[in-house]
Image (tube, rainbow, N blue to C red):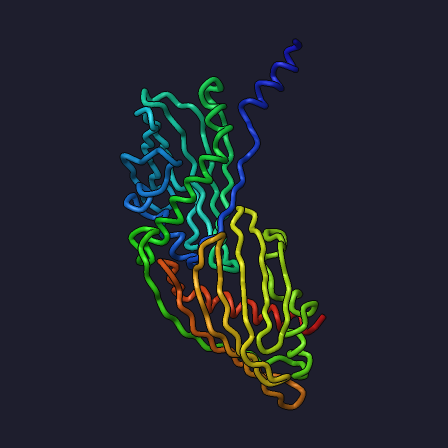
Amino acid sequence: MSQATRTNKDSAVAQPPPLKISRVFHAPRETVFKAWSTAEHVRRWFSPERCSVSDAKVLMQVGGAFEVCMCLPDGTKHWMRGIFVEVVPHSRLAIGADVEDDAGKRLFRALTEVDFADALGGTRMDVTQTYTIHDPSIAAPMVAGAAQGWSTTLDKLQAEVMRIQGSAEIGVRSVVHATFHLQRTYDAPVARVWKALTDAQAKQKWFAGTPGSWQLLERHMDVRVGGSERLKGRWDGGVVSTFDAIYHDVIPNERLVYSYVMHLNDKKISVSLATMQLQAESGKTTLKVSEQGAFLDGHDDAGSREHGTAKLLDALGASLSD
């Protein structure tokens, strides 16, 4: 083997491809971000299934410590010792850290970049982890299993987010009620706005997940009294969100009243009643939206449903200019 070939192979081992994983949490960005902010929170979730965190130090500021001692099922301990290199509240974190074995030997270095964004259903969190391997014999298998490890780690994060919002554990039953009112005036005739609300082809232009990060699985709508609507899609992180609605009152160009249920995967997270009223004036249309929601078993809304609906109404307005 030539020296150049050997150098290229060594480089490939030292620089494996970055890991990218996403998850949608039914919670506002502030809550998901908060789960990274203290050692108390991080100890509860920052480890894969069957592992635990015995010690942690977290100081969320640029240059502040992010140190976690992870205990494996066989009793082995690995330390992740690093610092925050970026902190943008509720939007982005970056952590540079070395992973060490229980003897203090560095195994690999990881740059963990975390981006938080509003999404249908709450908050989308994107994690990108880039590796530099110090000891290929031990670290390479660990990095190879990182995707599975992160998947179960984010399951724990989901539980911690729910705990922060008021549910001590996933099995706790609770209901939190919330009501909001929104209003938009569109520079379009009332018939055009009504079509955007009730025609399947027109509605798909604005009522959907984030383009590029959401895959449509199922869509149908039948806007009549007793008719139903379903929108189902999968986010990049694997979470499937489902919107199931039933129409109770339909007065063309004037009013829609419907109830809907939201699921994340197989978990029912909310049941809501929504009213939309349209009023025409001088060629423009005012749309008034009122919604009452029952948020179930720790999926406390905390304003994220109102914020998400507001973004959808803005998207509706943009679709009217097409």
280 or 105, nearer to the observer? 280
Q: Measured from the top left, where is residue 149 in percent x and y?
A: 44, 35
Q: Quadrant of residue 75?
A: top left
Which quadrant of the structure image shows residue 231?
Answer: bottom right
Q: Is residue 267 above or below residue 278?
A: above
Residue at position x 29%, y 43% in the image: 39
Vertical comparison of 15 with 33: above or below = above
Provide residue 319's location: percent of width, then percent of height: 66, 70
Quadrant into which the N terminus falls: top right
Horizontal side of 37 relative to 281 (left or right) equals left
Residue 23 vs residue 40, the one in the foreground? 23
Check the image and name the residue furthest to the right.
Answer: 322
- Residue at the image point whose x is 65% and y is 15% from the top: 5
Residue at the far top: name it.
1
Q: Quadrant of the C terminus?
A: bottom right
Q: Is residue 303 positioned above or below 131 on the image?
A: below
x, y (%) of residue 198?
64, 74
- Toward the viewer: 140 or 23? 23
The structure residue drawn at horizontal position 43% and vertical position 57%, both measured from the top left corner, is 29
Rendered location of residue 78, percent (x, y): 35, 27
